[in-house]
Amino acid sequence: MYLEKFKSRFAELSHRFPRKLIPCTKEQIYSLERRSGLTLPIAYKEFLLWGGVWAGGLFIGSNCFYDSLPELRKAAEELLESDEFPEPLPEDAFVFFMHQGYIFWFFKTSEGDDPPVYGYEEGGAGVPYAPVPFKKLSSNFSKFLEELLEGEAGVRKK
């Protein structure tokens, strides 16, 4: 539905990501929703049902798969606190990605079925902090995945 272009391009690049895709089950997604108290957007659920446990080698080295998702919001809040960042995460923020404890990405569950993606990078805002607390990285989750895929594939060119 939302991720058809992403999934099609991934299939074209499968020689660069030769590992098996492992999707989340619907039960795992329901569990994430219960634990977070949020209803996840359709585009994100589609990603989880495609490769939410393991995405075939995509995003190696980052925390973005099912086993780490429940702890990411707390880790993001701790990073903001340690950086003395002036804004809290929005109540409806779902942190879906963290890289080495200094970058995280999230969407707001109230912003539709294919929501914009926001990010934070330690030290990225500068001090004093800019008036816009979180950087908008993409207008929607599906486009964001497409851009990440192209970046990851470019890095892995052989």
Image (cartoon, rainbow, N blue to C red):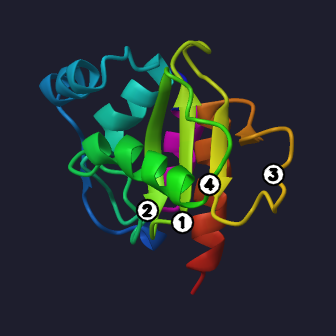
Mark 2: amino acid: Leu
**Label 4 with label 3: CB-CB less than 8 Å:** no
Q: Secondary structure at mark 1?
A: loop
Which residue carries the number 4 mark? 84
Which residue carries the number 3 mark? 129
Query: Crowding at label 3, few (<14), some or many (≥20) Cα neighbours within 10 Å?
Result: some
Q: Is residue 122 above or below residue 158?
A: above
Q: Secondary structure at mark 3?
A: loop
Judge by depth and name the residue closer to the eye, 72 or 10: 72
Which residue carries the number 2 mark? 58
Query: Crowding at label 4, few (<14), some or many (≥20) Cα neighbours within 10 Å?
Result: few
Which residue carries the number 1 mark? 102
Query: Crowding at label 2, few (<14), some or many (≥20) Cα neighbours within 10 Å?
Result: some
Which dot, 2 or 4, sits closer to the camera? 4
Numbered mark located on residue 81 in the image? none
N-terminal-most mark, 3 or 1: 1
**Label 2 with label 3: CB-CB less than 8 Å:** no
Residue 19, position as x, y percentages in the image: 29, 66
Mark 3: amino acid: Tyr
The structure residue drawn at horizontal position 64% and vertical position 47%, both measured from the top left corner, is 119
N-terminal-most mark, 2 or 3: 2
Mark 4: amino acid: Glu
Q: Quadrant of the C terminus?
A: bottom right
Gap in angstroms between the C-alphas marked 4 and 3: 10 Å
User: Which residues lie in the magenta part?
Assistant: 4-13
